Amino acid sequence: MAGKKQFDMDTVLDAAMIQFWRSGYAGTSLDDLSRATGLNRSSIYSSLGGKDGLFLRCLDRYAARYGDKFDAALSRAADDPVAAVRAFFDVTLGRIADPAVPDGCLMAQSVMAGPTLSPSVAEHVKELFGLQRPRLRAALKTGGMSDEDAEDFAVHVAAVNQSLAVMGRGGASPEELRAIVDVTVDAVARVRS
């Protein structure tokens, strides 16, 4: 089709996701997105729904990518809550150590940006951000924790997980981050003993 610009959606979404992750929603302009993706502004609007539409797609992509990694880690250690929590944190520590992605967590940054987001985008961010807790709770219950302990530790592990991303972005060393993980893993082990 003459005049219809073709592009690889995966490449565009990855480039835009990195841009939003690096600069945040408010710090990313349409010109930034155009430079990052190679698309002109009109293509971003017509093909991707503008800045909000592209941001939503990037959030969904991020949540699916890391959600799948968290699910795989938790399922490999399904019968042992201690191993499950360690495997869960290993996903985050691996992401923090990965030089191919920006520091921090796109989801945590996006939650913090809530006041700058449209109400519908802010609501979607909250929904995605809330996915970690039920994922953790289910894994901990499968591993034999009581409902109450599984809920308490799911909240705690999710909070520590976000803290790791913030501290990683703030320059904490891998050793400091591992020490934080070890404290939480030790607490889970004490409940199990």
Image: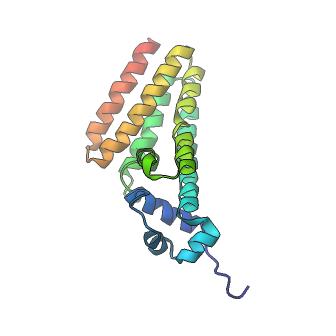
User: In the picture provided, is 29 more to the left or to the right than 144?
Assistant: left
* Quadrant in the rendering for residue 9: bottom right
Q: Residue 41: give x, y in percent of width and height.
A: 53, 75
Q: Residue 80: give x, y in percent of width and height.
A: 52, 23
Which residue reaches farthest bottom? 2
Compared with 124, 16 (above or below) is below
Compared with 144, 24 (above or below) is below
- For image coordinates 52% across by 41% down, the residue present is 126
- For image coordinates 43% across by 70% down, the residue present is 32
Compared with 143, 20 (above or below) is below
- For image coordinates 32% across by 36% down, the residue present is 178
Tell which of 101 and 170 is nearer to you: 170
User: In the picture provided, is 14 more to the left or to the right than 1?
Assistant: left
* Quarter of the figure with the N terminus: bottom right
Q: Residue 71: give x, y in percent of width and height.
A: 57, 38
Which residue reaches farthest right? 1
User: In the picture provided, is 19 more to the left or to the right than 63?
Assistant: left
Tell which of 155 and 126 is nearer to you: 126
- Report the coloring of the rendering: rainbow
